[in-house]
């Protein structure tokens, strides 16, 4: 049994990784592949039987995992951001979400025959989207900035708020089932709120005063979350999920508490937990489904997609300033995700143990809604966005970190070549000069929390870190690896290879591919510009190819970028040689003594 358990857990970890990797490759939410893997391993093949494998440990394992998932989601909610997210988002996460809940509950009661308590619970879980399913879809969908920001903020805010509301509905259902009075329900909710708030305050107290060393902070928070969850459940039954949700919201909004590293750790841990948890939960689905449940789930999904979501968006976006095209796309995109799947499975386990009628239908209906919305919207949203004319083109643009002469010259050349360019820096003088030259700018550090909220990356797909600050260049590259990919971030050296000794070198994981040739540094680039060198854009042809360019402008010319005939930007790096071909446009730094451009070339 021990060997079987160890092998199955290791196998689920690997299958979870493969599902996450496949989702990354095809740019779809990972939850889809995780659920499908669980269904194949469980009800289809019978290889994985979670109840037999884990036995009495199943409920505690699922409970603790869901507690950590809810804490991680609620930790990201910032109250100070709520007033600035726009009227549409506020409507979607308030009365829009309430309208969705009530409509889904009514439909579940009428179509699936669920009792009103279970139907309300279905509605509460079915109105939650979340950043883990929205973000991958937005990368594929690429809508305009207003749509992207609305959907992204809706997912971020409704994730913890929806979970909180679902927990409150669950508490009410359980209290009613167990014959508890209203006073017991209020005491249960109050206990969860108090324990969560006190736990957050105590953790903040220790963190503010540096009483916990940095390398133990993640461990301490993890232990505190699980302890708060378990203690709350012991003191007042079923209040643990509410406690950890309140703890996350409180800890994330207390002043003087830096939770970025904690949040990063929880996100990584949540990825592992979600991967294993969803495979386990999907493997427990009954097959075949209860009579009529598959049909009811399919009808509920269609009505949620075609009726409920468009109506709630229409209601929530009144007076928001969104066009009808933008509202139409927002009304189509609402994939359900982690909270709906994990919390529904946990609630179903508990309600089934209490003998609540209809509890066995909750998970199949929610999972049908998840799979249906993810598959349909992933397959159709991009085409719909193009048809509605609210889609952005391929992310060919460039974010340039820096605003001095070098950054402005590079940005100007790329801008004139037809690429969207944004110069970002916290040097006001440089930003002012860039604006005077007609460049789009962002005043602030591009790796700051301010940039996460206000820097518009629509159409941007690369980062060039060319500021005079060596360490900040590297930090910006590390920050944007997750956004653009490791192969789409570059830095301009501040030290030559001879100067970059072991004492001066940065750790390898902080380094991005260096721009241009081996000897090109920021100082050398700036010096060449001051000597009269200029950046030249020229279209190559069969009669004027790259060797002719070198012959004409001089062998000291430095190739910076190449633009293929289809408009694809190629960045020159010392780690990747570039051979321009006829039909390409080349962007190069040429010496002042070069002759005039020959007849027939463009630039």
Image: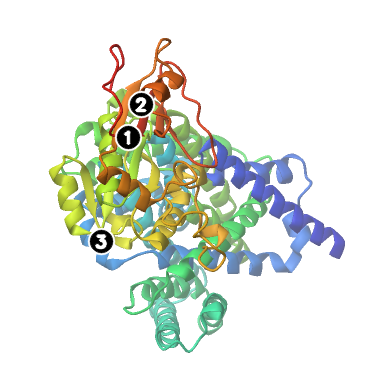
Residue at the disc numbered 3 = 82
Q: Quadrant of residue 242?
A: bottom left
Q: Secondary structure at mark 1?
A: loop
582 vs 501, left or right, is left
What residue sits 43% from the left and 30% below the top?
555
For this orientation, the residue located farthest to the front is 593
The tag earlier along the polypeptide, 2 or 3, is 3
Residue at the disc numbered 2 = 553
484 vs 58, left or right, is left
Q: Residues within 10 Å of mark 2 (few under 14, many from 20)?
A: many
Foreground mark, 2 or 3? Answer: 2
Up-down relation of residue 192 to residue 507 (above or below): below
Q: Secondary structure at mark 3?
A: helix
Residue 228, horizontal then vertical, whole percent: 51, 80
State the separation of the CA atoms marked 2 and 3.
Answer: 55 Å
Foreground mark, 3 or 1? Answer: 1
Residue 112, horizontal then vertical, whole percent: 49, 43
């Amino acid at each position: 049994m021990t060997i079987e358990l160890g092998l199955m857990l290791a196998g689920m970890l690997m299958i979870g990784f493969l599902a996450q990797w496949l989702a990354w490759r095809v740019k779809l939410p990972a939850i889809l592949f995780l659920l499908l893997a669980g269904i194949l391993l469980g009800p289809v093949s019978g290889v994985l039987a979670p109840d037999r494998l884990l036995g009495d440990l199943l409920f505690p394992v699922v409970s603790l995992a869901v507690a950590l998932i809810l804490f991680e989601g609620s930790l990201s909610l910032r109250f100070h951001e709520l007033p600035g997210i726009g009227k549409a988002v506020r409507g979607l996460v308030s009365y829009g979400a309430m309208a969705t809940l009530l409509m889904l509950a009514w439909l579940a009661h009428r179509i699936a025959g669920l009792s009103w308590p279970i139907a309300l619970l279905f509605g509460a879980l079915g109105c939650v989207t979340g950043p883990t399913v929205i973000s991958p879809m937005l990368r594929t969908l690429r809508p305009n900035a207003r749509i992207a920001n609305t959907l992204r903020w809706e997912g971020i805010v409704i994730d913890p708020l929806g979970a909180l509301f679902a927990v409150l509905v669950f508490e009410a259902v359980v209290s009613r089932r167990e014959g508890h009075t209203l006073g017991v329900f209020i005491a249960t909710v109050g206990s969860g709120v108090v324990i969560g708030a006190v736990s957050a305050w105590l953790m903040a107290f220790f963190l503010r005063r540096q009483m916990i060393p940095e390398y133990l902070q993640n461990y301490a928070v993890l232990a505190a979350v699980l302890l708060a969850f378990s203690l709350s459940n012991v003191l007042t039954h079923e209040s643990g999920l509410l406690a950890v949700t309140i703890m996350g919201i409180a800890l994330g909004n207390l002043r003087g508490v830096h939770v970025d590293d904690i949040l990063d750790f929880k996100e990584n841990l949540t990825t592992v937990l979600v991967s294993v948890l969803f495979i386990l939960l999907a493997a427990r689905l009954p097959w075949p489904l209860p009579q009529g449940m598959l049909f009811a789930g399919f009808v509920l999904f269609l009505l949620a997609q075609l009726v409920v979501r468009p109506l709630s968006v229409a209601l929530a976006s009144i007076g928001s300033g969104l066009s009808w095209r933008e509202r139409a796309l927002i009304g189509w995109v609402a994939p359900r995700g982690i909270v709906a799947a994990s919390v529904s499975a946990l609630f179903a386990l508990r309600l089934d143990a209490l003998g609540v009628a209809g509890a066995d239908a909750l998970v199949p209906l929610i999972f049908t809604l998840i799979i249906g919305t993810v598959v349909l919207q992933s397959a159709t949203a991009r085409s719909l966005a193009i048809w509605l004319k609210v889609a952005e083109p391929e992310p060919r643009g460039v974010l340039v970190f820096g605003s001095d002469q070098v950054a402005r010259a590079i940005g100007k050349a790329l801008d004139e070549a037809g690429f969207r360019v944004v110069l970002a820096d916290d040097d006001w003088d440089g930003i002012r000069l860039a604006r005077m030259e007609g460049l789009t700018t962002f005043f602030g550090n591009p790796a700051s929390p301010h940039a996460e909220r206000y820097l518009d990356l629509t159409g941007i797909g690369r980062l060039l870190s060319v500021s005079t600050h060596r360490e900040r260049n590297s930090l910006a590259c590390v920050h944007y690896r997750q956004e653009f990919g490791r192969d789409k971030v570059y830095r301009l050296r501040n030290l030559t290879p001879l100067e970059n000794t072991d004492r001066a070198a940065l750790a390898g994981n902080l380094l991005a591919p260096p721009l241009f040739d081996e000897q090109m540094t920021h100082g050398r680039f700036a010096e060449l510009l001051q000597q009269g060198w200029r950046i030249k854009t020229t279209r190559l042809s069969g009669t004027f190819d790259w060797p002719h360019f070198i012959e004409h402008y001089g062998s000291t010319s430095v190739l910076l970028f190449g633009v293929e005939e289809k408009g694809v930007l190629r960045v020159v790096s010392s780690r990747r040689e570039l051979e321009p071909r006829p039909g390409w446009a080349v962007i190069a730094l040429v010496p002042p003594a070069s002759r005039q451009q020959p007849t027939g070339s463009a630039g």
